[in-house]
């Protein structure tokens, strides 16, 4: 619950491999690892990148305390010369990453680590743990916000999150993706994001009657008076009593700046429509009608189709746990090893019977290609870092597997943007994370670059992630080199 040195937040095999490199290889051999994922969560058309800020903190603080080394000694697997090496261990390499809030797609590197092999190997587990979780929740939140169609979405899943860290950083990720606030007070303090909330049924039940509970709450919080109306009888008690309190506030000259009701059970479509009629008839057409109760993007979409008059959504369990898609599936693969004599990177590739699991070799970056007129994403192009592109010239894109599928972009019809930016250079952080609410604004702009067909919740259009011609040929030459004649 307090700050911890996370260096041992790793799988044991990372450390046993490190000792193997230390004993049997050049421990300073420079390598490149790519972190990427293979499929969008929820079979969606995109994902949202999140977690980089915590990755930065983790890398900055990477070191082995004396008690860490004592613990490793007690396991009985590690020799004293390796343990002595760990005493002065620090990250000394380079890291490139896609900024938080960016729309991302499968197979493209979210993070690229260029470092001595022992350092690059150690950071794998924690890096994936952080990026996988926070990108998953940001993506889920983006889907929920999209379903709400401009209505406010509040995150309040802390009590159902899988532990304090998941609750805190999940709420942060949800804010990045467009939630208007969180119930998580510690998240609000840590990341300077809005905190919001109403009251529980226990508040109502603790008073002699519902009306007294409402009056007391309104007296305490006149500028944030959202009353929970389903403790006893929503239509015959809760809403009438809420209206009576709003009328009393109005007669007392108290400005009704932010007020309304919350529904937490029952048929939300039916009850919200009835509530709207009652509030309008009483002279409160601008009252907020908020709803909660196991909501997600699918249920919100359904309620809107049914004509529900809800205009504020509280989403908890299904968002903070991404209940219907509980993992992101990011992986971390070796892409190249530096030749000590030439200083050039030798590309490496992982083979598989499954074409989707064959890795992309070499020192790579990503060029995002936009339609010049609309600003929408045409495709992402994974390419080698030294490749040059000129938007004043034509560009041929092709599917890296079904290569006959091609798109020709005319000169001047598109623009390019490189996605990977430097985060660490020679072990020093060269990147300053924006504030969460600034990342949220950026994320909103990013989502606006997707075509509507890619945003839809079911059977979305998939944005193409292609390989440059040079990278495609390198990959296929490596594949051919592993075919031996009998």
Image (spheres, helix red, strand yellow):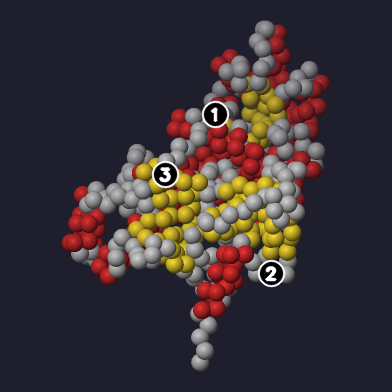
Residue 104 visible in rendering: yes
Within 10 Å of disc 2 (Cα), the crowding (few <14, some 14-19, many 20+) is few
Q: Circle 2 — which element?
A: loop
Q: Which residue is mark 2?
A: 403
The answer to whether 364 is drawn above or below residue 373 in the figure is below
Within 10 Å of disc 3 (Cα), the crowding (few <14, some 14-19, many 20+) is some
Whichever of callouts 1 and 2 sits on the residue coming sooner in the sequence is 1
**Which label sits on residue 194?**
1
Q: In terms of depth relative to the viewer, which is nearer, 396 or 76?
A: 396
Specify whether 146 is left or right of 25: right
Whichever of callouts 2 and 3 sits on the residue coming sooner in the sequence is 3
Distance Cα–Cα, label 2 vs label 3: 38 Å
Distance Cα–Cα, label 1 vs label 2: 48 Å
Residue 20: where, in percent of width, then height?
29, 68
Residue 190: where, in percent of width, then height?
44, 33
Specify whether 426 is left or right of 84: right
Residue 462 visible in rendering: no
Specify whether 285 is left or right of 127: right
At 30% across and 50% down in the image, what residue appears? 90
Q: Nearer the viewer, mark 3 or mark 1?
A: 3
Q: In terms of depth relative to the viewer, which is nearer, 454 or 108?
A: 108
Q: Nearer the viewer, mark 2 or mark 3?
A: 2
- Contact? badges 2 and 3 (CB < 8 Å): no
Whichever of callouts 3 and 1 sits on the residue coming sooner in the sequence is 3
In this view, the residue farthest toward the left is 80
In the rendered image, the quadrant that contains the N terminus is top left
Q: Nearer the viewer, mark 1 or mark 2?
A: 2
Q: Which residue is mark 3?
A: 56
At 49% across and 60% down in the image, what residue appears? 363
Q: Circle 3 — which element?
A: helix
């Amino acid at each position: 619950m307090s700050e911890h040195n996370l260096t041992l937040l790793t799988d044991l095999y990372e450390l046993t491999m490190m000792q193997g490199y230390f004993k049997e290889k050049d421990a300073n051999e420079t390598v490149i690892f790519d972190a990427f994922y293979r499929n969008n969560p929820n079979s969606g058309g995109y994902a949202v990148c999140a977690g980089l800020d915590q990755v930065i903190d983790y890398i900055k603080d990477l070191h082995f305390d004396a008690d860490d080394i004592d613990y490793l000694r007690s396991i009985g697997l590690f020799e004293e010369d390796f343990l002595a090496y760990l005493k002065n261990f620090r990250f000394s390499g380079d890291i490139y990453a896609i900024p938080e809030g960016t729309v991302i797609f499968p197979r493209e590197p979210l993070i690229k680590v260029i470092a001595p092999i022992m350092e690059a190997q150690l950071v794998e587990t924690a890096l994936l743990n952080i990026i996988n979780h926070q990108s998953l929740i940001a993506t889920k939140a983006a889907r929920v916000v999209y379903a709400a169609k401009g209505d406010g979405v509040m995150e309040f899943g802390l009590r159902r999150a899988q532990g304090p860290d998941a609750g805190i950083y999940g709420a942060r990720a949800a804010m990045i993706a467009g939630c208007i606030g969180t119930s998580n007070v510690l998240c609000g303090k840590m990341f300077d994001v809005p905190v919001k909330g109403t009251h529980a049924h226990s508040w109502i039940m603790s008073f002699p009657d519902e009306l007294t509970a409402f009056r007391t709450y309104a007296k305490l919080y006149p500028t944030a008076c959202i009353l929970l109306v389903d403790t006893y009888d929503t239509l015959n008690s809760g809403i009438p009593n809420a209206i009576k309190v709003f009328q009393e506030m109005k007669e007392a000259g108290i400005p009704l700046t932010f007020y309304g009701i919350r529904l937490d059970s029952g048929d939300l479509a039916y009850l919200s429509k009835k509530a709207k009629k009652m509030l309008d008839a009483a002279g409160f057409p601008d009252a907020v009608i908020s709803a909660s109760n196991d909501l997600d993007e699918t249920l919100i979409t359904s309620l809107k189709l049914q004509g529900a008059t809800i205009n504020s959504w509280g989403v908890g369990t299904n968002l903070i746990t991404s209940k219907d898609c509980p993992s992101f599936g990011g992986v971390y693969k070796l892409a190249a090893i530096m030749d000590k004599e030439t200083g050039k990177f030798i590309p490496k590739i992982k083979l598989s019977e499954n074409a989707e699991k064959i890795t992309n070799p070499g020192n790579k970056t990503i060029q995002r290609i936009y339609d010049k007129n609309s600003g929408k994403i045409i495709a992402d192009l994974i390419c080698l870092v030294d490749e040059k592109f000129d938007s004043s010239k034509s560009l041929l894109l092709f599917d890296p597997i079904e290569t006959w599928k091609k798109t020709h972009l005319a000169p001047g019809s598109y623009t390019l943007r490189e996605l990977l930016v430097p985060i660490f250079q020679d072990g020093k952080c060269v990147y300053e994370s924006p504030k969460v609410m600034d990342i949220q604004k950026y994320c909103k702009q990013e989502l606006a670059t997707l075509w509507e067909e890619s945003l839809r919740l079911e059977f979305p259009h998939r944005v193409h992630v292609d390989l440059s011609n040079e990278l495609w040929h390198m990959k296929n030459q490596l594949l051919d080199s592993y075919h031996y004649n009998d």
